[in-house]
Amino acid sequence: MARETTEELGDGRYRLGARIGKGAMGTVREALDARTGETVAVKLLLPELAEDPVCIERFRREALAAAALDHPGIVRVLDSSEDPPYLVMERVAGEPLPRGPLEPDRAVQIACKLLDALEAAHEAGIVHRDLKPSNVLLVGDQPKILDFGIAKLSSSKVGQQLTRSGERMGTPAFASPEQMSSRDVDGRADLYSVGLLLSRMLTGEAPPRSALASVLTGQAKRAPDPRVHRPSLDRGLAAVVVRATALDREERFESAAAMRAALAPYAVARRRGSWLPYAIGLAVLLLVAALVAFWPAPSSPPAPAPSPRVTTTEPTILRPEPRAVPPQPEPEALEPEAPAPTVLEPAGSSLGMITAGPCRALEVATCECARADREARCATTRARIRAWMTSGDFRDAQARCEGALAQACP
């Protein structure tokens, strides 16, 4: 077979860089894709296995398995070659699956995403058979499965038997009992491995070798309960792990989807005692709400006085109210006075005083009344004569005065 240089592959398309990983069958190196300019990962078969047909077939099977899957939880295979054998994969900048102990909700979330990727693989007829921490990279919160080198393909043309006599497939610490006993496997073998990975993330402890030995020899039916290492773990979550790691695969979950559904309730925070901070927070919120509700509202600043409006109005003229004038008797029609006859009387006579003018009538009447000692009549006469003088009615003044005097002094 023609060999390419160790620093370039694919007719110079892939320029190899530093080694970033190593496995039982090969090494993984960083490379630059000269055609696309992207950084990729190239998996190379170890030189001592390059002539082994079984290893070459497994290498080819990995390429077929990964190429048949398009899932965010599985590392994509971009290119492959059989001479020399290599795989070109997407370069994933992730970390190996954490050992733990993690918070239960985070560990369960990672396990559920692993099961989602395995469900896609199982539906495509592919069983991974070698799930272990180094074959799962965690990119943020997304786990990515890689290394389908010993995957079982139901459509493989090579057949199912790619193991040598006495050879066991998978890593013993995380492989199912049926793999260790070289029996036929199905998707439930991967569920067993996921159960052990979840137990490791929850407790920070890998299954002890003594416990694994008892499982493999049939002395125990399942791996240890994770609450042995973490007593505070939820009983229901521990039951899911115990069921997934049952020795008899008939007691395990029937599919990846079923196991994911059983884990779903624990994918959210379910910590004991976690009610206390929530209760304190609620009490603080209620206190703040009460203060806001009963706190006196700040007095609003007085509204600015409106600017004076200059208006031009006519001055109000106060006019006195007209007083009611009592009706005055209509003056009698004035008749032309006859010229008073000139009567010559001796001086000192009362008659002479009257004829001298009406203005003397009151004085005359008063004197006459005084002489006659008749005060009552004098008062009446005086009033009558005063009325005549006020009204200015001087008609028949002489006759009136004589009549008055006659009444006052008969």
Image (tube, rainbow, N blue to C red):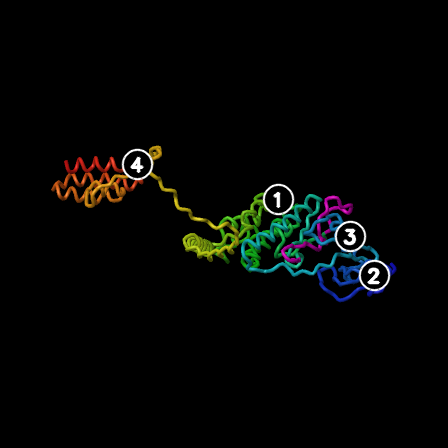
Tell me if residue 280 can be seen.
no
- Quadrant, the N terminus: bottom right
Choose the circle earlier in sequence order: 1 or 4: 1
**In the image, residue 28 lies at what x, y percent?**
74, 61
Where is residue 282 shown, x and y percent of the image? 45, 53
On the rendered structure, is 246 left or right of 74? left
Disc 3 marks a residue whose amino acid type is Arg
The residue mark sitting in front, 3 or 4, is 4
Amino acid type for the residue under numbered disc 4: Arg
Are the residues tagged 2 and 3 within 8 Å (C-beta)?
no
Numbered disc in front, either 1 or 3: 1
Q: Please give the residue where the numbered disc 2 appears in the rendered image.
A: 34
Residues packed near mark 1 inside 10 Å, few (<14), some (14 to 19) or many (20 plus): some
The 10 Å Cα crowd at callout 2, few under 14, some 14 to 19, many 20 or more, is: few
Q: Nearer the viewer, mark 4 or mark 2?
A: 4
Residue topped by disc 3: 60
| Magenta stretch: includes residue 150 | yes
Alpha carbon distance from label 1 to label 4: 144 Å
Disc on the earlier residue, 4 or 2? 2
Q: Nearer the viewer, residue 395 or 287?
A: 395
Q: Secondary structure at mark 2?
A: loop
Residue denoted by label 1: 257
Circle 4 residue: 395
* Amino acid at dot 1: Ala
**Marks 1/3: CA distance?**
28 Å
Identify the residue at image location x=52%, y=48%. 239
Quadrant (top left/top right/bottom left/bottom right) for the C terminus: top left
User: Could you say where residue 41 lies in the image, as x and y percent from the top left?
Assistant: 75, 60
Q: Which residues are magenta?
A: 137-162
Q: Residue at x 73, y 47 (%)?
A: 153
Amino acid at circle 2: Ala
